[in-house]
Amino acid sequence: MFYWCGSLTSIDVSNFDTSQVTNMINMFNGCNSLTSLNLNGFNTSQVENMYQMFQACKKLTTSITIKNNSNNVVYSNMFYNAATESNSQIIVNYTKETSELVDNMLNTKTTGSHVIKGEEISI
């Protein structure tokens, strides 16, 4: 959707209805100037593919809650080269059911990136 929008610095997608979205491949990949991304209300419960979703978002500060507890979610390179600059941070919140999935997603981050596991959220 915003793939390689290199000059984009801020996006508010909090009003997007993502309740039926299954594919978020490369959604923000390459948005290397993006510093602010409002994902409040973003519903990931049906998402099956998050491949490279935040790749190369090196300046990004945001949080996302992962709600899909399917074992079939594709998340390769989801956080590769994401939040690598000093003032950036991606917080990944989770549900009780998605805690292990989020741990695996965090394993896709680059050494030195500021992608961290956030809080357990009740749904």
Image (cartoon, rainbow, N blue to C red):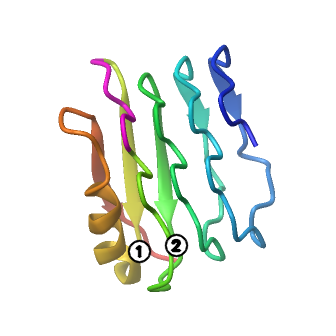
Near-viewer residue (37 or 5): 5
**In x, y percent, where is residue 117?**
28, 55
Near-viewer residue (18 or 7): 7
Q: State which quadrant residue 122 falls in.
A: bottom left
Asked if the residue under mark 2 is in contact with the one under mark 1, i.e. CB atoms within 8 Å, the reply is: yes
**In x, y percent, where is residue 5?**
69, 25
Residue drawn where x is 26% and y is 40% of the image:
110
Which numbered tag is attached to residue 54?
none
Which residue type does callout 2 highlight?
Lys
> What residue does disc 2 label?
67
Which residue type does callout 1 highlight?
Thr
Residue drawn where x is 27% and y is 47% of the image:
116
Using the image, determine if residue 93 lies above or below residue 123: above
Cα distance between the residues tagged 1 and 2: 6 Å
Residue drawn where x is 61% and y is 67% of the image:
44
**In x, y percent, where is residue 33?**
55, 17
Q: Is residue 31 left or right of residue 115?
A: right
Q: State which quadrant residue 80 falls in.
A: top left
Q: Is residue 13 left or right of residue 67?
A: right
Quick one: SS at disc 1? loop
> What residue does disc 1 label?
95
Considering the whole magenta stretch, tell me its main secondary structure.
loop
Using the image, determine if residue 20 lies above or below residue 15: below
Q: Magenta segment, which residues?
A: 80-86
Near-viewer residue (21 or 95): 21
